[in-house]
Image (tube, rainbow, N blue to C red):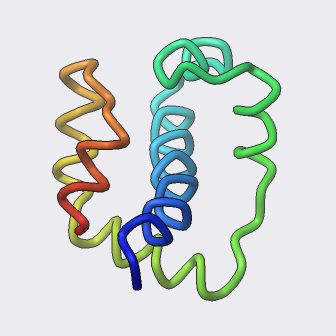
């Protein structure tokens, strides 16, 4: 799969995973939006979103292989989707 197609498909899943994790940690939708440079409305849509089976499979793979990286970014307050995508490439 060409890298640009992978980025298009992976970036929303990474956002979804990060948003869900931040929300579980007690961050408000507005706080999450500020961290990810997204609107509160966009965050709300991500939180309501149900993943399709293939998306769940990929998301679970990302979580199992890269949750340490995601948690480190969250804990250091330096969330960088592009950096995570590079690690997945």
Q: What is the quadrant of the C terminus in the image?
A: bottom left
Q: In the rendered view, would you say 56 is above or below 63?
A: below
6 with respect to 48 (left or right):
left
Q: Quadrant of residue 34?
A: top right
Q: In which quarter of the image is residue 6?
A: bottom left
Residue 28 in the image: state x and y as whole percent: 62, 18
Residue at position x 35%, y 78% in the image:
61
Q: Which of 61 and 89 is in front in this view?
A: 89
Q: What is the quadrant of the N terminus in the image?
A: bottom left
Residue 60 in the image: state x and y as whole percent: 42, 75
Residue at position x 60%, y 20% in the image:
33
Q: In the rendered view, would you say 89 is above or below 81?
A: below
Residue 77 in the image: state x and y as whole percent: 27, 18
Residue 27 in the image: state x and y as whole percent: 53, 21
44 with respect to 72 (left or right):
right
Q: Which of 29 and 34 is in front in this view?
A: 34
Residue at position x 53%, y 25% in the image:
26
Q: In the rendered view, would you say 44 is above or below 8?
A: above
Q: Nearer the viewer, residue 86 or 78?
A: 86
Residue at position x 23%, y 26% in the image:
75
43 with respect to 74 (left or right):
right
Q: Quadrant of residue 8?
A: bottom right
């Amino acid at each position: 799969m060409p890298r640009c197609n992978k980025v298009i498909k992976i970036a929303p899943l990474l956002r979804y995973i990060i948003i869900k994790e931040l929300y579980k940690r007690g961050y408000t939708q507005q706080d999450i939006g500020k961290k990810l440079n997204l609107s509160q409305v966009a965050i709300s849509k991500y939180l309501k979103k149900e993943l399709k089976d293939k998306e769940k499979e990929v998301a679970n793979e990302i979580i199992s292989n890269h949750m340490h990286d995601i948690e480190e970014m969250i804990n250091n307050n330096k969330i960088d989707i592009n950096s995570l995508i590079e690690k997945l490439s």
